Image (cartoon, grey):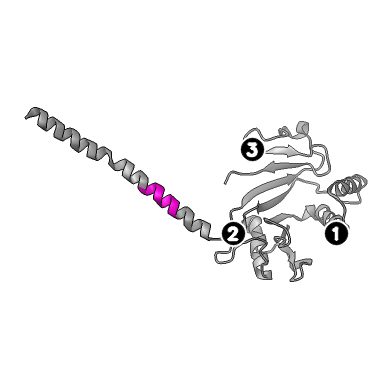
Amino acid sequence: MKITSFLLILSILAMGCSKPSYKKNEIINSEKEAASETSIFEIPSNQKLSIDQQIASAVLAAPIEGRGEAMVYGYSESGEFMMLREGSNDFICIADDPQKDGFQVVCYHKSLEPMMARGRELAAEGKTREEKEEIRNNEAKSGKMPLPEHPATLHIYYGENAYFNEETDAIENAKYRYVVYMPYATQETTGLPLAPNESSHPWLMFPGRYNAHIMITPEN
């Protein structure tokens, strides 16, 4: 009798122990179904947004308090770069270029505009990256191209599979980055490493150059 009771108890315990594996299978199946549903949705590529949508998406890169009055650049129906909205604060935002793969919107302090605008001009002239850097470096040294007198930040949302959700007015699948420009800053003057110590840690890029800047890419 005692042996029978003992075996009965073991049987009950065994049945109880089998439940987690059943739940695990449920979780695995649910994950597979979710993945299947997600794969049905195709991520928009090279979105062609309306002017209002370009403005709405571009300003999301700016600090919240700066979005309402920021100047916004974007693209016409024919793909021409143009001003979409005049601004009255210290921020300039640029909408995603639908002619380029991936998604990118930026917003930066207006003191960076001479450098950014010059870069756009040189790109329109067909200059290579190396040529643009040499020209801007020389113009910065001569004073022809003004540089910010204080640290100035560029904010950016970007990603190969990122896109603007037209239903929720939110940017999906994107990373966020802060780029703090400090012309001619060096490791010695800032105490920053020249490569991130760990993921998301700040580091100094292009030390000693006109476009030296601190890179900060938070983990999402």
Highlighted range, magenta: 26-33
**Inter-mark Cα distance, 2 to 3:** 30 Å
Real-space CA distance between mark 2 and mark 1, rounded to the nearest whole angstrom: 30 Å
Give the crowd class for mark 3: few <14, some 14-19, many >=20 residues within 10 Å. some
Element class at badge 1: helix
List the residue tagged with mark 1.
Answer: 124
In percent of width and height, residue 156 lies at 68, 52
Instruction: Classify residue 92 by image quadrant.
Output: bottom right
Q: Amino acid at mark 3?
A: His
- Which of the two discs, 2 and 1, sits closer to the camera? 2
> At x 79% / y 37%, what residue is drawn?
207
Marks 2,3: beta carbons within 8 A: no
x, y percent for residue 55:
67, 65
Tell me if 80 is positioned left or right of 156 in this view.
right
Query: In x, y percent, where is residue 166?
Result: 59, 66
- Say which residue label 3 marks: 201
Task: Find disc 2 in the rendering and name its residue.
Answer: 43
Is 60 located above or below residue 207 in the figure? below
The location of residue 118, given as percent across then percent down, is 85, 55
Q: Earlier in the sequence, mark 1 or mark 3?
A: 1
- Assess whether mark 3 and mark 1 are in contact (beta carbons under 8 angstroms): no
